[in-house]
Image (cartoon, rainbow, N blue to C red):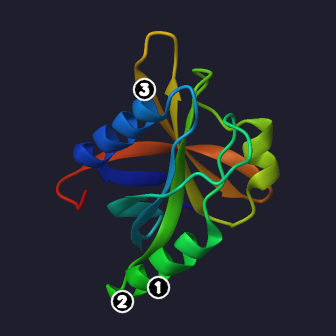
Amino acid sequence: MISALSMPQALRDRIAEEALKAYPGECCGLIEGTRDGNTAVAAAIHSTRNVAKTPDRFEIDPAEHIRLLRAAREKEHTIIGCYHSHPNGVSEPSAADRAGAGEEDFVWLIAAVGKDKKAKIAAFVYGARAFAPIRLARAKGAKV
């Protein structure tokens, strides 16, 4: 089971910027990378269209997901997780997140934007029908 996500600060900053730009709606995207033992290693993030029917939800276009998965495989990477924002300021999985999750050992980053208009990012892994918090570690270099 994944216990940490190694991600460069530049990628975290970009997610925070996307969350602030989408506010009061939700941004979303996919995280490309690899796995090193129990650590997921982020190499790039890919902003995706939010195709959810309501502004307080997120849904990644399945066609974009498949396209990005194929492109990642060409680089011997995979899609290790997703990210999205919570405009309610709560940086933990919501009931909607729990209902929509399904891929085992998949990383979820949540960028919570509160009334202070600052994004706070928290990391989780989905497995055994539940989310567990994981450590968000700093790494050097990556594609933004």
Q: Nearer the viewer, residue 126 or 21?
A: 21
Query: How far is disc 1 from disc 2 in space, using C-alphas?
Result: 7 Å
Q: What residue type is disc 2 on?
A: Glu
Name the residue at 68% across, 38% down. Answer: 93
Return the x and y of residue 121 as percentages of the image width and height.
45, 34
Compared with 127, 122 (above or below) is above
User: How many badges with numbers are in the image?
Assistant: 3
Q: Would you say the residues marked 1 and 2 are in contact, meaning their CB atoms lie under 8 Å apart?
A: yes
Q: What residue type is disc 1 on?
A: Arg
According to the picture, the residue beneath numbered tag 2 turns out to be 74
Name the residue at 77% across, 54% down. Answer: 100
At mark 2, the secondary structure is helix
Q: What residue type is disc 3 on?
A: Ala
Give the quarter of the image for residue 128.
bottom right
Please give the label number shown on residue 30: none
Return the x and y of residue 117 as percentages of the image width and height.
43, 16
Q: Nearer the viewer, residue 56 or 100?
A: 56
At mark 3, the secondary structure is strand
Instruction: Rate crowding at label 3 as few (under 14), some (14 to 19) or many (20 or more) other CA atoms within 10 Å.
Output: many
According to the picture, the residue beneath numbered tag 3 turns out to be 119
According to the picture, the residue beneath numbered tag 1 turns out to be 70
Instruction: Rate crowding at label 1 as few (under 14), some (14 to 19) or many (20 or more) other CA atoms within 10 Å.
Output: some
Query: How far is disc 3 from disc 1 in space, using C-alphas?
Result: 30 Å
Instruction: Rate crowding at label 2 as few (under 14), some (14 to 19) or many (20 or more) other CA atoms within 10 Å.
Output: few
At mark 1, the secondary structure is helix
Name the residue at 77% across, 47% down. Answer: 98
